[in-house]
Image (tube, rainbow, N blue to C red):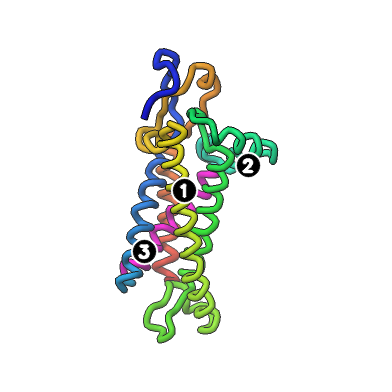
Amino acid sequence: MKSTANESNLVKVNVWDLFIRIFHWLLAVLIVVMLVSANFGYFDIHITTGKTIVILVIARLIWGIVGSSNARFTALVFKPSAYINYIKTLPQRKPGYSLAHSPIGSLAVIAILGFLVFQLTTGLFAADVDGLVEGPFAYYISYELSRTASDLHLQNVDWLISIIVLHIAANLFYYFYKRDNLIKPMFTGSRSVPKDKSQDPPRLASPWRGLIVVAIVAAIMIWIYVQYG
């Protein structure tokens, strides 16, 4: 991929905190495990993985309130004109050098989290026809509602996969067409941008804050799983 900016005019800026990076890649791995385990009938692994993703997603939702400035939900909301103006820049074969999610990228984040929350919620209460495989909380609702949750769980997975595929396709589009590597910063946490775009870097939260959030959520959810699941 050829650079479209003079290297001497680029400076390195930290754009993604450790919490977001670990969450992103761990979630990707766990979703693959979820899909494979379900397809091959390893439902013990499927349910355990689902419980783990619940912890991750709840922690991410909290991080959207107390985390780094570009990870907060307020950073995912744009005026309608911002979406229109951003779409106009898509044909241009040059990086956008964004220090946060773009308007379109923010929609992807919201969509993925939304479909994930729905998928996890229905999975927690789902039950198969024979009642041999049940979500941890299926016992607390009627069999009919559990079956409805199971049907919705199966239907929603197609939407979730579709959104994820679009997300991957968008990153490939940015890499090959826009010459903008959005994947590397999600590993390293930093990216090189022109000096004029580095004047207002995102305020990154401490990794310790992320660890505390995960620890508290994990402790509460594990207690709930043991007591009620």
If you read the primary sequence from the N terminus, does the residue marked by circle 3 or circle 1 appear first? 3
Q: Position of residue 34 (x, y in %)?
A: 36, 63
Asked whether the residues under the numbered discs 2 and 1 touch, taking CB atoms below 8 Å apart as contact, a structural biologist would say no
Asked whether the residues under the numbered discs 3 and 1 touch, taking CB atoms below 8 Å apart as contact, a structural biologist would say no
144 left or right, relative to 31: right
Residue that numbered label 1 is attached to: 167
Depth check, front residue: 46 or 229: 46
If you read the primary sequence from the N terminus, does the residue marked by circle 3 or circle 2 appear first? 3
3 left or right, relative to 194: left
Residue that numbered label 3 is attached to: 35
For the C terminus, the quadrant is: bottom left
What predominant SS class does the magenta segment belong to? helix
At a point 46% along the width and 31% down the height, the residue shown is 15
Q: Which residues are magenta?
A: 44-65
At a point 55% along the width and 50% down the height, the residue shown is 110
Residue that numbered label 2 is attached to: 77
Question: What SS does tag 2 mark?
Answer: loop
Q: What amino acid type is highlighted by mark number 2?
A: Val
At a point 51% along the width and 44% down the height, the residue shown is 63
Question: What SS does tag 1 mark?
Answer: helix
